[in-house]
Image (tube, coloured by chain):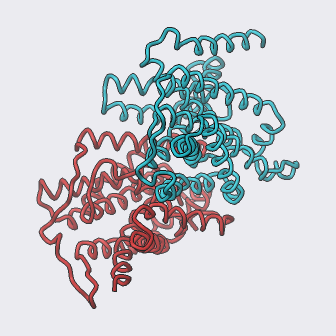
């Protein structure tokens, strides 16, 4: 146990030291990667542990983005105040939307969240202070290292939270909801409160990631802030890695982003095509994610793949 | 008069929306797969009709059966050899695999057909009739009527034929259907193929009234999704009604609220419906 912690601490230290040696391009990739991993990890809180797949997390991302941008561009407030505003907006939205929508179960919840981002984007593009559909320009800072360290710190905080959840009474409650919601309720789990809290936590980290990204990119508009494909990416990274585990979403997002960048560098258009094929094959051969694959390979070797197909085919 | 014109526009568009959603609702109701590649099927159907029209000179409406046949084949093979492998996996996984298929098909189309805008433009594309001061474009009327015919045909197949009974039986109880001699691997593939064929027909009609690119799929999937929920999965004619509601709501919203609200309106309606009556289960009866 101690050795594992030491190894993790070493890994984080090495990542934190990367700006000392890496060139600017590496750092930029790094920021992107860390923010995406944070998104996958925060999606994991509700989607992985409670089994409620949210397609509305990009709305929280957008609110974090806009909170930061409005504070900094319109009121010339510092970055931290902007982040706080973004978080307040996103968490308030999560609670307001969560209470009615989380009454829906599983798939129907997923569907109801689908339109959240699009609806907010439409509303925002009619608000003057948010720059309507033209967008906002944030003050420029050339400090890639700061953004990198912020993103890393956020990912570490988010992962620690998920680790705490995985061992806490709260996390057990979420898993109970995922396995059998009626039974969980009978056993005294306050399901509505647990689900809304999970959604709010998810919104909290997602909004900060949005805020960091906005300040880093310095320009936002409704289409980029509420980009629905971003939400699909978080789901895929988390599910690919292993939903409901602490490290699965991290492994998934690191690996998928790396695969995608390598493909994009060498193949351009065909990259997206192969990306699609990778997902199809992954679902067929390792439906419980990379994390489970690693465990399964150790246990039964290559028969793991055939077992999966045997179990899930018609 | 503006209002009447908007209403007519909405109804004509809504019929086509209904046809788009039919295939998705069928697959969802019977196989319990929310097919995120549905829009990609619509897109492929549109390209089928486009190439039949531009290369072979086939009238787009006459090309529809051919496009449906091609898409039936695509759907049948995909279900038989890919989706049947994971059909008992977690619902999130079927969502994920159809998303992967959607990405694959979209970029295959981009490689094969390029990202150019395509318009299926028969000689009568600009023709319209004016009735009581309301203008009705003929191609849209044709698309609307075709959509109604196909929806009725699906209803007849489901209610009156042996195949339809097998499909409904499987949706209700797979084990019992098996005991009565239904081969589920084949039946699932046929159902998925039917869904793809309906998507193909919708795509051909969409190509006639609008523009086709490899990327039209995503929004059309989302619309089909909303309409499937609104109509429920038990009756094809309800799906068409759901399509009409969305079509009319969009046409009115574009003028009275502003064009930015068009996409928000269908989702707003969806959330309202889901929250108002969440307890319903969406399975084919």
Q: Is residue B197 visible?
A: yes
The image quadrant of residue B193 is bottom left
Rendered colour, chain B: red
Q: Is residue A43 visible?
A: no
Q: Quadrant of the N terminus of chain A?
A: top right
Residue at (46% x, 51% y) in the render = A131
Residue at (37% x, 61% y) in the render = B198
Q: Quadrant of the C terminus of chain A?
A: top right
Percent position of residue B130, x then y:
23, 85
The image quadrant of residue A237 is top right
Residue in front for this viewpoint, B240 or A116: A116
Residue in front for this viewpoint, A218 or A235: A218
Residue at (28% x, 85% y) in the render = B134
Q: Is residue B121 above or below residue A255?
A: below
Residue at (72% x, 13% y) in the render = A4
- In the displayed structure, does residue B268 sit left or right of residue B139? right
Percent position of residue B279, x then y:
69, 65
- In the displayed structure, does residue B182 sit left or right of residue B40? right
Percent position of residue A241, x then y:
58, 29
Q: Is residue B5 above or below residue A124?
A: below
Rendered colour, chain A: cyan
The image quadrant of residue A168 is top right
| Residue at the extreme bottom of the image, as rendered | B132
Q: Is residue B89 above or below residue B279?
A: above
Percent position of residue A76, x then y:
55, 40
Residue in front for this viewpoint, B245 or B25: B245
């Amino acid at each position: 146990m101690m050795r594992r912690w030491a190894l993790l601490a070493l890994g984080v230290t090495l990542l934190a030291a990367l700006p000392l040696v890496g060139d600017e391009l590496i750092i930029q990739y790094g920021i992107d990667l860390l923010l995406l991993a944070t998104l996958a990890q925060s999606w994991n809180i509700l989607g992985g542990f409670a089994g409620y797949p949210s397609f509305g997390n990009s709305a929280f991302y957008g609110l974090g983005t806009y909170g930061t941008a409005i504070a900094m561009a319109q009121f010339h407030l510092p970055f931290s105040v902007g982040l706080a505003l973004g978080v307040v907006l996103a968490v308030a939205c999560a609670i307001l939307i969560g209470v009615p929508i989380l009454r829906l179960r599983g798939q129907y919840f997923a569907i109801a969240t689908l339109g959240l981002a699009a609806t907010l984007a439409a509303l925002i593009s009619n608000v003057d202070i948010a720059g309507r559909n033209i967008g906002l320009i944030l003050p420029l800072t050339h400090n890639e290292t700061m953004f990198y360290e912020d993103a890393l710190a956020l990912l570490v905080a988010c992962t620690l939270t998920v680790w705490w959840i995985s061992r806490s009474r709260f996390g057990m409650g979420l898993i109970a909801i995922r396995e059998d919601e009626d039974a969980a309720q009978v056993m005294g789990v306050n399901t509505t409160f647990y689900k809304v809290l999970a959604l709010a936590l998810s919104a909290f980290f997602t909004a900060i990631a949005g805020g960091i990204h906005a300040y880093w990119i310095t320009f936002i508009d409704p289409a980029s802030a509420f980009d629905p494909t971003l939400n699909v990416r978080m789901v895929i990274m988390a599910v690919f890695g292993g939903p409901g585990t602490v490290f699965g979403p991290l492994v998934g997002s690191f690996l998928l982003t790396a695969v995608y960048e390598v493909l994009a560098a060498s193949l351009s258009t065909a990259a997206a095509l192969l990306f699609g094929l990778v997902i199809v094959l992954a679902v067929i051969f390792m439906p419980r994610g990379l994390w489970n694959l690693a465990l399964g390979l150790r246990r039964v070797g290559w028969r793991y793949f055939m077992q999966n197909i045997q179990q899930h085919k018609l | 008069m503006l209002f009447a014109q908007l209403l007519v526009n909405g109804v004509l568009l809504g019929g086509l929306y209904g046809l788009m959603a039919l295939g998705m609702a069928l697959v969802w109701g019977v196989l319990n797969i929310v097919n995120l590649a549905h829009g990609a099927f619509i897109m492929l159907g549109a390209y089928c009709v486009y190439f039949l029209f531009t290369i072979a000179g086939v009238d787009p409406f006459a090309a529809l059966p051919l496009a449906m046949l091609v898409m039936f084949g695509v759907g049948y093979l995909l279900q038989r050899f890919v989706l049947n492998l994971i059909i008992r996996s977690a619902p999130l996984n079927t969502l994920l695999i159809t998303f992967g298929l959607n990405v694959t098909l979209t970029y295959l189309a981009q490689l094969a057909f390029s990202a150019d805008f395509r318009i299926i433009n028969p000689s009568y594309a600009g023709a319209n009739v004016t009735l009581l001061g309301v203008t009705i474009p003929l191609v849209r009327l044709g698309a609307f009527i075709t959509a109604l015919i196909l929806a009725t045909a699906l209803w007849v197949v489901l209610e009156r034929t042996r195949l339809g009974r097998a499909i409904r039986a499987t949706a209700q109880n797979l084990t019992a259907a098996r005991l009565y001699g239904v081969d589920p691997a084949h039946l699932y593939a046929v159902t998925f193929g039917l869904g793809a064929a309906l998507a193909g027909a919708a795509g051909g009609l969409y190509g006639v009234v609008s523009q086709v690119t490899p990327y039209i799929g995503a929004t059309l999937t989302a619309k089909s999704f909303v309409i499937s929920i609104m109509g429920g999965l038990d009756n094809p004619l309800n799906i068409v009604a759901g399509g009409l509601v969305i079509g009319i709501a969009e046409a009115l919203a574009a003028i009275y609220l502003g064009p930015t609200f068009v996409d928000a309106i269908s989702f707003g309606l969806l959330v309202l419906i889901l929250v108002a009556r969440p307890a319903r289960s969406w399975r084919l009866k």
